[in-house]
Amino acid sequence: MAEDINRIIDELHIYEKKVLKAFESLGSKLSPEEVMESQKMDIKPVMSAAGSLESKGLIKVNKKVDEVISLSSVGKLYAEEGLPERRMLKVLGEKEALPMGELTKKAKLDKSESKIAIGWLMRKRWAVIDQGTVKITEDGKNALGKNENDEVLLDKLLESQKMLLFNPSKIIQQGYDLLVKRKGLIDVKKTTKHTLEITQKGMEILDAGIDLVEAATQLTHSQLKTGEWKNLKYRGYDVHAEYPEFFPGKMHPLRRIIEEIRDIFLNLGFTESRGPILESAFWNFDCLFQPQDHAAREMQDTFYIKNPQHSKLPADDLVGRVGQAHEDGGATGSEGWGYQWDKEVARQSVLRTHTTCVSARFLSENKPPLKMFSVGRVFRRETITYKHLPEFHQVEGIVAAEDINFRNLLGILKEFYKKLGFEVRFRPAYFPYTYLSTECEIYLPEKESWIELGGAGMFRPEVLEPLGVETPVLAFGLGIERLAMIRLGIKDIRMLYKSDLGWLRNLPVTQGIDLED
Ligand code: DAH
């Protein structure tokens, strides 16, 4: 407790100290003016110090809003001559019913006042209008001899000029409510009165004793040079003080995981490559030994492009070798698929359905040994749901060298997922372009289950021979969005594309990336 008090005192600003000191001699409840006077301060420092003392619980700032009302010039006139509707009522009291024009004249009102008067006659139910004739009602008759509440207040204001609207009687309040509805009759002035009241905690601080030595906040050149700074008093720094929330710009979490994945492969010595999103069926399917009637090529799965409907094919001899591999295996040692391969089908433009076409392109242009990876968008005709999008990201990779084998593939994938913090296992699988083939799954401890993340395998001779590759090639293609979802703890994949600012702002800036690297 004593420590607490000392810390509070240490953190007090000189203005706060001065305001507190005022309570020492003047009592426990003070007006800002009293503080100003006794401490020789301006109103601004007093009020700002009062605010911060209040937030520290050392004083209480009570606010009282006063409403002072008075008559405007029109108001005064009405107070003297009577409200327009009262003047009409008086005439009606003698005549019971009169045409509107005559009534106005008799009541000595001008046109605009007459309108107001009629309006209020209706509102107060003092009269009704029947075909241009104004008739007094029972209420009107009853009202003849006595003042309504608005008139009572008008009289009072005429008498006293000003009135503090504090805890008003029912009559005054109702009169006020009626009069403020009419523009320009009464003036309302609001003034706020503050009272500063010291709290128990504030007293304890005062009792502990505060001295009014000014603490240094900004050091000058000469204070530093002469060493004077060593003897200065410094104000304590409140590290728990509230600060305004702010949201610095940061990378989108999906982009962040992509960058992390790129980092991993670059650190493993892989070369990064890219390929076009608008691809020919040739690179997307044919040179991966996917037969032209393969299910994945069907319209449900693949976006075929109308414009440009066809894409350029590579050199004839490569195209020829690929076609041959499909038809009878060509020089690959395989029997092929045994059907008539159609170059026109291979020319069709598609949005790539996987990034494996980037690997095929890379192999056609580079000689082993090589290690390549590529991150990019792929497209499939999927209905959008919480777990499917027609557009998502994959990371693709290959390693080509003399002694590469399936075990190396498993080792690389294990290492990759380990770096991302996941445990991986492998299941046998089938892809037209690999043998052996596998699917990787990672374990989700919270769900106690395994989920599938991508495919991998050793490229078949039917893929490699036409591309002119003579070494074994291991290959893998892995989904990224699912990894992001697990990492971020989200159940709906659409969250990644929704730009939900609240969610994005609240994600930690460093999620998933080790800044020390
Ligand atoms: N392309 C496959 C897919 O999109 C994944 C894949 C499987 C990529 C095996 C590969 C591979 O490179 O060898 O589902």
Image (spheres, rainbow, N blue to C red):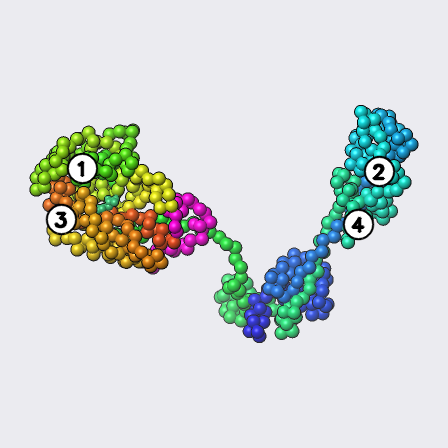
Q: Give amino acid for label 1.
A: Pro
Q: Give amino acid for label 3.
A: Pro
Q: Which residues are magenta?
A: 490-517
Residue located beneath label 2 in the image: 139
Residue located beneath label 3 in the image: 472
Within 10 Å of the Cα at label 1, are there few (<14), some (14-19), or many (20+) other Cα atoms?
Answer: many
Mark 4 CB lies closer than 8 A to ligand 1: no
Which secondary structure lies at badge 4?
Answer: helix
Q: Earlier in the sequence, mark 4 or mark 2?
A: 2
Q: Is residue 132 left or right of residue 417?
A: right
Say if 45 sits above or below 452 in the image.
below
Measuring 76% from the left and 44% from the top, which residue is drawn there? 177
Q: CA distance from mark 1 to mark 3?
A: 22 Å
Q: CA distance from mark 3 to mark 2?
A: 107 Å
Say if 195 sits above or below 277 in the image.
below
Q: Main secondary structure of the magenta part?
A: loop
Residue located beneath label 4 in the image: 170
Q: Assess whether residue 162 is covered by the magenta stretch.
A: no
Residue 297, horizontal then vertical, whole percent: 24, 36
Which image quarter holds the N terminus?
bottom right
Q: CA distance from mark 1 to mark 2?
A: 97 Å
Which image quarter holds the C terminus?
bottom left
Q: Earlier in the sequence, mark 4 or mark 3?
A: 4
Q: Give amino acid for label 2.
A: Asp
| Circle 1 or circle 3, nearest the eye | 1
